[in-house]
């Protein structure tokens, strides 16, 4: 049987893990952008290769409504992060254009992920020094 102290310890560990995960994936502007870009690319693939076939082959249009709405929200969020990078972080317009074009091409966001990871690593080393 669990004691109160066991529950408290479990809750503390849970909040620590949540904070650790949040910091890792959303702690810096570069990691935030990388995480949202990955989710946006994944949602695009789900829309194209799962929801669209379900709509047209399975007569299930609600799949496109749900996944399409999620993908649209992630695309807007990505756009806002790119605009933030252009204005507050001093990134070039070609940097922003490359990310937004990659968001329109299936699988391109995953190829761009290596460059975004390098930005996260660079930002982490600049912050730690």
Image (cartoon, rainbow, N blue to C red):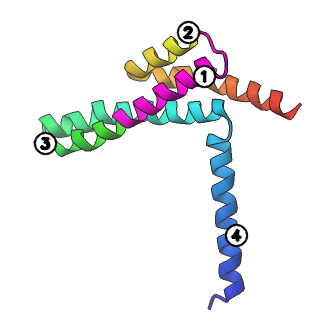
Q: Which mark is residue 12?
A: 4
Marks 2 and 1, the one that precedes in the sequence: 1
Of badges 1 and 4, the one in the foreground is: 1
Of badges 3 and 2, the one in the foreground is: 2
Q: Which mark is residue 67?
A: none
- For the N terminus, the quadrant is bottom right
Query: Mark 3 near mark 2, Cβ–Cβ under 8 Å?
Result: no
Residue 100, above or below 93 = below
> Based on the displayed image, in which of its 4 quarters is residue 127 positioned?
top right
Marks 1 and 4, the one that precedes in the sequence: 4
Residue 25 horizontal side relative to residue 102, left or right:
right
The residue at the point 64 percent across, 50 percent down is 21
Q: Answer few, some or many: residues within 10 Å of disc 2's Cα (few below 14, many 20 plus, some between 14 and 19).
A: few
> Based on the displayed image, in which of its 4 quarters is residue 107 positioned?
top left
Residue 47 horizontal side relative to residue 19, left or right:
left
| Main secondary structure along the magenta-highlighted residues | helix
Query: Mark 2: which secondary structure?
Result: helix
Query: Mark 1: which secondary structure?
Result: helix
Q: CA distance from mark 2 to mark 1?
A: 10 Å
Query: Mark 4 near mark 3, Cβ–Cβ under 8 Å?
Result: no
Q: Which mark is residue 85?
A: 1
Q: Which residue is mark 3?
A: 58
Residue 2 horizontal side relative to residue 101, left or right:
right
Location of residue 85 in the rendering, given as x and y in whole percent from the top left corner: 60, 22
Q: Which residue is mark 2?
A: 93
The residue at the point 55 percent across, 8 percent down is 94
Q: CA distance from mark 2 to mark 4?
A: 43 Å
The residue at the point 20 percent across, 35 percent down is 53
Which range of residues does the magenta coloring cover? 72-92
């Amino acid at each position: 049987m669990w004691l109160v102290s066991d529950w408290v310890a479990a809750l503390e560990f849970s909040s620590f893990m949540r904070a650790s995960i949040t910091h890792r994936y959303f702690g810096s502007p570069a990691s935030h952008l990388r995480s949202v870009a990955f989710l946006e690319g994944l949602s695009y693939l789900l829309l194209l290769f799962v929801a669209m076939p379900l709509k047209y082959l399975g007569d299930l249009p609600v799949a496109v409504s749900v996944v399409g709405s999620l993908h649209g929200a992630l695309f807007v969020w990505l756009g806002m992060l790119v605009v933030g990078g252009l204005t507050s972080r001093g990134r070039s317009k070609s940097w922003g254009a490359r990310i937004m074009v990659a968001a329109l091409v299936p699988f391109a966001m995953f190829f761009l992920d290596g460059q975004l990871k390098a930005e996260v690593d660079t930002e982490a080393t600049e912050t730690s020094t």
